[in-house]
Image (cartoon, grey):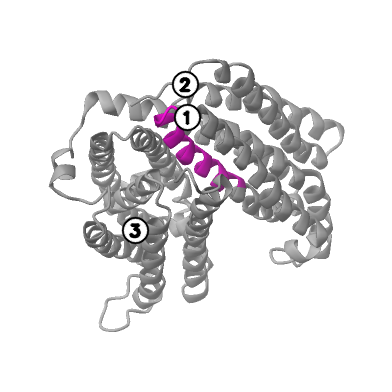
Amino acid sequence: MSADTPLWKTFLRFLAPLMLSNALQSLFGTVANVYLGQMIGVDALAAVSVFFPVMFFLFAFVMGLSTGATVLIGQALGAREHDKIKIVVGTTLAIGLLLSISVALIGGFFSRQLMMALATPADILAPASAYARIMLFTMPLGFVFLLMTAMIRGVGDAFTPLLALTLSMAIGLVLTPVLIRGSFGLPAAGIASPAWAAAISNALTLIALAIYLRRKKHALAPDAALLRQLRLNGAMLCKILGIGLPSAIGMVVMAIAELVLLGLVNGFGSDATAAYGAVNQVMGYTQFTAMSISIAVSILGAQAVGGGDRTRLDGIVRTGLAFNLVLTGGLVALIYLAPRAVLGIFIIDPAVLNLAKRLLDIALWSSVPFGLATVFSGALRAAGVALTPMLLSIFAIVAIELPAAVILSRTIGLQGVWAAYPIVFCAMFVLQMGYYLLVWRKRAIQRVI
């Protein structure tokens, strides 16, 4: 970050490719499901969906691991201790490979038993097991790809991951229908086609990424110095997990809470469940914007912490808050201008559409305080403080959101479940902001690495 460049420009240059990268990842999953549904059938979609809980938990771990690594990389960069960057990268890749290979071997060989444990319906057990087997066996490729693109962002480079994700998605989108049909002399892979396509695209993109990084003499280029650090450094691993594990646990707790809320919604009938799905799809886009801003705050903030520059960190927090009000708030306002048109993308039934609109009116605006809360938690993570933000979030979910949803659902009905969202997000905002301003900011700034 150049001291001469206005902070908002630095922030935007990092944020724009980051948001586009996340959008591409979501798009690939959506298009792959369209291929399956249109070219094979609904059963194929159902079989793939069964694997989602497993994928979520693995994804949560990778996200936690990458969060810890990017914060330490950012702090090392800010402190100009470039030798420590390769130690962080090597340790992260080593633990990622070790665990993903273990998951691949155990999960791959016992994929059928895993699907049975998830109560997979008998009519889709075989295809679901086949899909899970390939996904698990090729998990190391996915782990390394996700970790590398995340860690590259840790040095302030969000453009290279965007290039890598674009290439990976392009390969995957071409290969998936080819493998489904068995075209160009390739055998038909059926339901496992997206899994094979993802594995091949990850492998080819990793090769291209390695060549690109070496030619650019990038800080994370896979050179001899990095390969020497490809081992478990106990002290560094503890620091990575100290930041990463709370982040991963927080994701899992939020997912479990969402399942509880879905159970409450299901009690109001299928129309309520359909409306829930549509409204969550719409809110996902606003929350996705907020989370991207939080990641930018965390990475850029880590560089400021590494340099011991509290003034710049405060500026990054203010910029993150402003971007949330403008981008997240702006997107919320646009959706409120034409809610039926937006929800109509997912719903055609008039009664469900009316219900979804009422629920959207209640909950959508809460994406703004949610985003403001994640700015403060992102800044705290940048300083290596991950446990307290996680505990504050869990407190808000367990002590405020879930009781509010249960009580309000019994007193005012379905709308009460959705009222729990603004209640908990406002509570999170107050808690995270309060801890940042009233407690942490009064302490001396210290880097972890």
Name the kind of residue labelled 3 in the image.
Answer: Ala
**Residue 61 figure quarter:** top left
Q: Residue furthest right?
A: 412
Q: Residue at x 72, y 49 (%)?
A: 329
Label 1 to label 3: alpha-carbon separation: 52 Å
Q: Is residue 302 left or right of residue 392?
A: left
Say which quadrant the C terminus sits in. Answer: top left
SS for callout 3: helix
Q: Residue at x 30, y 63 (%)?
A: 205
The crowd level at tag 3 (other Cα within 10 Å; few <14, some 14-19, many 20+) is many
Label 2 to label 3: alpha-carbon separation: 51 Å
Give the camera-side residue of 218 and 422: 218
Report the magenta residues as a range: 290-309
Q: Looking at the picture, does residue 351 appear above or below residue 190?
A: above
Q: Residue at x 40, y 71 (%)?
A: 170
Q: Which mark is residue 309?
A: 1
Could you tell me residue 111's position as x and y percent? 33, 48
* Mark toward the start of the polypeptide (1 vs 2): 1
Give the residue number, with chain letter if any, for mark 3. Answer: 130
Q: Looking at the picture, does residue 439 appear above or below residue 50?
A: above
Name the kind of residue labelled 2 in the image.
Answer: Ile
* Mark toward the start of the polypeptide (1 vs 3): 3
Q: Which mark is residue 445?
A: 2
* Mark toward the start of the polypeptide (2 vs 3): 3
The crowd level at tag 1 (other Cα within 10 Å; few <14, some 14-19, many 20+) is some
Q: Is residue 405 left or right of residue 49?
A: right
The crowd level at tag 2 (other Cα within 10 Å; few <14, some 14-19, many 20+) is some
Could you tell me residue 231's position as x and y percent? 18, 35
